[in-house]
Structure formats: structure tokens, C-alpha cells
Image (cartoon, helix red, strand yellow):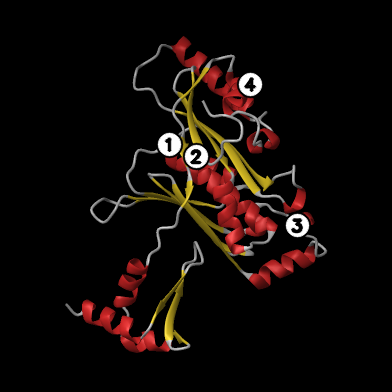
Amino acid sequence: MVTPGDDDFVLPFQVDAPDLRGRLVRLGPAMNEILNRHNYPDPVATVLGEAMALANCLSDMLKYDGVFSLQAKGDGPIKMLVADVTTDGNMRAYADVNEEAYAEALERAGGDEHAMDRSVPKLLGGGYLAFTVDQGEYAQLYQGIVALDGQTLSECVHHYFQQSEQLETVIKVACAKDERVGDVGPWRAGGIMVQRVPDSDRRDEMEDEEADDAWRRTAALLSTASDEELLSATLAPERLLFRLFHEDGVRVYPMHQVHDVCRCSAERVGRMLAHQDRAELDDLKIDGDVVVTCQFCSREYRFNDNDLDKLTASSTH
């Protein structure tokens, strides 16, 4: 059982109505470290936190061995955001902000970030949402793409399942600073996702009607979950699931932990640089070194002339 105070996990569950499975996500210190590492404005951090909660909900529903990535790209103040999770629960994320467009949006809000419209159309603009499953160079890359059609990222994901997968899905996520500490508090995110999995067994007409009723009831009950319940650091998730779905019965399975771990390394950056022309690398030098900064974790990797000579030599063999 998950106890109050536990954080950074995905909790699988099943509603004991036909074919209903779900995931409950709570993110705390791991997500907070990621957001604070970049010092994003609050509206940007909120949307990126929601993306991390969604990525964990979605990835845990899949059977894969590799990396699940959620990416949104638009023409608004947030040019792009990415959140990805490995099979082992290693999570990373970042957002690319159009500073000029963001400043204009903030000005329209009277300089008050709390008054800014944080909807997808206003922060991301027009664009697309992509889901990618990468299981390595020897496996086929899976990708699904849908337009940014919705007021929230959750609505965009819901639209994707409606249009592309034809899989009935309900999702609710939230992200905010810990209200117990106020505006300076750490970031928290939470989410619940339930899907109606198609049953391979044939049902008679009455069973189908009962299953439809159960799905509609589950979706309606999920909508009653408040942001406070999703974000709570003291409300045990089993208690929340029982409160929502006890009429039909709900059972939980072992949770999966989520970690703040970036996959960057000097070796990976070196392999990338080894494919560049040496003259191009020389043009990238800062104070005599080529400096590469990871977009996800902000770690710097420096390569001097000796390092570049070795990389260039290795690429010719």
C-alpha cells in the first residue's frame, strides 16, 4: 500500500466493471527538481508539469522496453515541450520558450503571471502533439500525432485517443505549487487516467448496455476528483480511488517508482560531435572549447582540442 507522503510513483488499478483499467500518478521531488533546474516562469512550469504527469500515465499503460516520449510543438509562447519516461521510470523534461512571444503574453495580462491565460491555445498556439515509443535501433519506432485541439493537454490527449486509437479514455491532471507553502512552495503534479479496453469476448446486448453504463458512470466519477485530491501529499491514493470507484469495486497493483534521471553522457555527446566536420566544430568553440549543454538537465560537456582530435580520429575508422 502507498502511504501518505509517498511521491513520484505510478499506481496501476482496475475498476471491477468490465474492461476498465487505470493509472494514478503523483509527482513531487523528482518533478520539482526538473522544473527548478530551468527556472521556468510559473505558467510554463505548470504546463510542463502536466505533460510529465500525462507522460507517466500514458507510458505505464503500454508494454514496451525503451523510451516513451510526449512532445508538443506550437507557434505560441511555448515553442516546444518534451517529457519522456523510460521503462525503468527515469523521467526528464524541458520546454523551449519564445521569450518575445511570452513577454507579449505577459504584457497582455498586465504583467501578472497569475492572470495569464494558461490554456493550450494561448501558451502553445497551433501545432501538434506527438507520442513516440522508441525501443532501440533494432525495433520499429512507433509514433502517433494529433493536432493541438483542446484547451488543456489532457483534452488534446483525449482527442488523440478518440481520433487515432478509437479507445475510450478519460484523463484528469493537475500541477501546482504546494499550497501548504504558498507561492514559494515546491511543485507537485497528479493525474488519473482510465481506459475502456476492448474485450475480445462477445457479449449479448444486455451485457453491452451494462458495460456502457459502467463506463459512463466511471467517467462521471473521475470528473469529480479535485485538483487538491490529485496533488495531495497526505491523501493516500488508495483512499482517493476508493472514494471515486467503490460502487463498482477497485483494486490496485504494485506501484512503479519515477526518478529524476537524465540519459545524457559525455560518450553520447561525443558520438554526436564525431559526425560533425572539424571546421564546423572549431566554429562552435567558446574560450577554446566546444561546449554542449543538455537541454533536459542543463549539464555542460566541454571538449578541448585533444578531445576533438580523438573524436575526429575515431569517426574515420
Q: Confirm or deny contact between disc 2 and disc 1 (CB under 8 A).
A: yes
Q: Which mark is residue 247?
A: none
Q: Confirm or deny contact between disc 3 and disc 1 (CB under 8 A).
A: no
Quadrant of image for the C terminus:
bottom left
Left or right: residue 19 versus residue 7 is left
Q: Single out the residue that lies furthest toward the right.
A: 110
Q: Single out the residue that lies furthest toward the left.
A: 317
Q: Position of residue 277 (x, y in %)?
A: 31, 84
Q: Position of residue 283 (x, y in %)?
A: 42, 88
Q: Which residue is mark 1?
A: 61
Res 248 → quadrant: top right
Vertical placement of residue 77 versus 192, above or below: below
Which label lies toward us, 3 or 2? 2
Label 4 environment density (alpha carbons within 10 Å; few <14, some 14–19, many ≥20): few
Amino acid type for the residue under numbered disc 1: Met
Q: Give the secondary structure at mark 3.
A: loop
Q: Give the secondary structure at mark 1.
A: helix
Amino acid type for the residue under numbered disc 4: Arg
Observer-nearest of 314 and 83: 314
Q: Which residue is mark 3?
A: 116
Q: Which residue is mark 4?
A: 243
Sequence-first disc among 4 and 3: 3
Residue at image coords 22%, 82%: 313
Q: Position of residue 238 (x, y in %)?
A: 57, 25
Q: What whole-number distance in Å separates the C-alpha atoms at marks 3 and 1?
A: 33 Å
Q: Which residue is mark 2?
A: 57
Res 226 → quadrant: top right
Amino acid type for the residue under numbered disc 3: Met
